[in-house]
Image (spheres, helix red, strand yellow):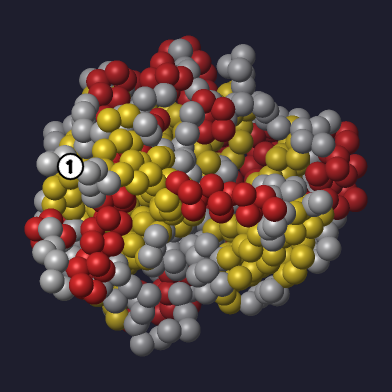
Amino acid sequence: MKIKSILIANRGEIAIRIARTAKSMGIKTYMFLSHHEPNALHIEHADEVIDVSDNTFINVYTNIDKLIEVALENKIDAIHPGYGFLSENPYLPRECERNNIIFIGPSSKAINQMGNKGLARNMAIKNKVPVLLGSKGVISTLEEAERTSEEIGYPVMLKAVAGGGGKGMRVVRKKSELALMYKLATNEAKSLFDNDAMLIEKFVENPRHVEFQVLADKKGNVVHLFERECSIQRKHQKLLEEAPSSALTEELRAKIGADAVRLCEATGYYSAGTVEFLLDKDLNHYFMEMNTRVQVEHPITEEITGFDIIEQQIKIAQGEAMDIKQEDIKINGWAIELRVNAEDVQSGFAPSTGLIEQMDIPNKKCLRVDSGYQVGKVVISSFDSLVAKLIITGKNRSEAIKNCRSVLNSTTIKGVKTTLPFFKQVMRTPSFVKGNYNTSFIETDLEQSFYQEDDELVAAAALAMQAYLNEQEKINSDTLSDKSVSAWAMSKKIKGN
Amino acid sequence: MRLIHHTKNYTLTGEQKVTVQVKDKKINKINNKKSHVEIEPLNEEEFLIKGEKKSHVGEIVSLKQNEVSVMINGNTYTFTIDTEIASKRKAKLSKKAGPKVEKVNAPLPGEIVVALVGEGAEVHKGEPVMILEAMKMQNEITSPINGKVKSIHVKAEETVMKDQLLFEIEPLK
């Protein structure tokens, strides 16, 4: 059945991204207007807006009943969940199926099997995809965690079975740390996924994080669109991704790609998906987890392969056979994604909320911007902090980096603090420029977390001093009033006081 | 007639310390070097700061008595401005008064998930004391110093405002 309408059960840049492809395919899009974001940008990109702003008790993006109700009421053919929220909840595709709504994503069974880290790990073992030494089943008590960690040998990684997106993971370096880390990980998992079951695996020191994008249709055809390197992370949250990875040789790329494809074939997986691997310093790869949804960083793969992943998801969902053969997929150039988050890098990446007062991003051929914000929009604390994805391309890696620098130099965002100063620093860090980095990059390679230009401190001190002197002058002249005031002080009313 | 120059030395205390000499109400030296910095307003908010090597665009974020915050290239610099003498006196006094109790406030609005340690517990710098959930993230609120938890002002499931006092850490003697 051809999909004629889609309910986009998401917000921000990904809602806009999905609408863009849907529109180009002649599909009508529906989005929600929620009380959280009465003037959200994504609304402007929808053909039809479902206003749920009266209902302040629900988060519509995580409410399956509401989604189904709206889809049925408006006779919408399909639901696209985007990423986050319900994208990896097996109950949504199940409910969709019961109500004859197409779910643009994998089957409920596949999400159960591959989205659960414990089951996915067993699936990998069964299909001869290498995994790290780890617990046999799930861990649900501290005593079990102690025993298993002892058997595996420290350091170990605690992982929430139901986790994803880097949440619910903790490294435990020695036995004395286990109790606290177990408490932290289970707490987080309970709160985010309502499931505090854990998995324990051997922790690999300074690994690289390499993931393969896969596409699979309902007829059993599976291909991969090569890898993304996602080693620039802070607390397991990706900040910058690039495709391809400078760590892989052609041979290794083919080998890991084949592992990813085999895993999908064995599980009857369909839709887009990502198989994540760790690469140790000797370039051994280990299956980590599978993400059964479209990822934040999917655009870099689109840029180097030329395929529209959302379009493929929609075609697969409506039952079409994929017309892409593995041998037709080629890597063309290099792409880097910078996640511009509303975070204060100088205060340990603390979220920064508020009104976007200025947002100047240059218009360049090498730059694609996926954003859910513009000047006048408000970043609130209810949702993630992603303001814009800057997707920058070049014919090779060094040109892509050069283009990143030039884009960063002419990008200004004001009103909220962002990760832009962080990326400026990354682009000047030798290990990154050489392509020789791993997940410990931020802790070990980065001199400081934000870039300071030459004499920036001196300029800041001069400006602060001058502002102070002017203020003093103003106070003096206000009290004396007969003294003349400097033209500079007159022309400038100091802001914020 | 001979001109009588009026010079005054200031210390700007922030993440990094900067000394400024003001001569006849103009910035004369920065960090003991002759200053060539020129500042001119660009518009309502921004200033062009022309340095020897490079020019920067900056703005004043806030000015409250002698505390000034400016922003340049997306970075924030907050300085406390004192005369050199006052700055030295302050340093001396704070040394005499001994280590001070660190108050930790909520960095953003959210909900307290759990306090990981109780009052009286010893904590190291950087060790998590409680977890605050906000922006879909569980944020660990860590101890800024090595010390003992003097008091905890919030409890689990409590909603907190930005800058609300969460706990106090007393330095170890």
| Residue at (39% x, 46% y) in the render | B10
Residue A441 horizontal/vertical position (percent): 52, 29
Looking at the rendered structure, the kind of residue marked 1 is: Leu
Identify which residue, B64 or B141, lies in the foreground. B64
Residue A81 horizontal/vertical position (percent): 40, 60
In the orientation shown, which residue stands out farthest toward the front? Answer: B1
Labels in figure, total: 1
Identify which residue, A309 or A461, lies in the foreground. A461
* Relative to B98, A378 lies left or right: left
Residue A160 vertical position relative to residue A290 in the rendered view, above or below: below
| Residue at (30% x, 25% y) in the render | A401
Identify which residue, A262 or B111, lies in the foreground. B111
Residue A381 horizontal/vertical position (percent): 44, 66
Residue A1 horizontal/vertical position (percent): 29, 58
Q: Quadrant of the C terminus of chain A?
A: bottom left
* Relative to B96, B8 lies left or right: left
Is residue A266 visible in the rendered image? The answer is: yes
Which residue is disc 1 drawn over?
A: B3
Residue A496 vertical position relative to residue A283 in the rendered view, above or below: below
Which chain is disc 1 placed on? B
| Residue at (48% x, 44% y) in the render | B15
Residue A195 vertical position relative to residue A365 in the rendered view, above or below: below
Is residue A68 visible in the rendered image? The answer is: no
Which quadrant of the view contains residue A3? bottom left
| Residue at (43% x, 53% y) in the render | B82
Residue A185 vertical position relative to residue A337 in the rendered view, above or below: below
* Relative to A143, A456 lies left or right: left
Label 1 crowd (10 A; few <14 / some 14-19 / many >=20): few
Query: Dot 1 lies on which element?
Result: loop
Which quadrant of the view contains residue A363? top left
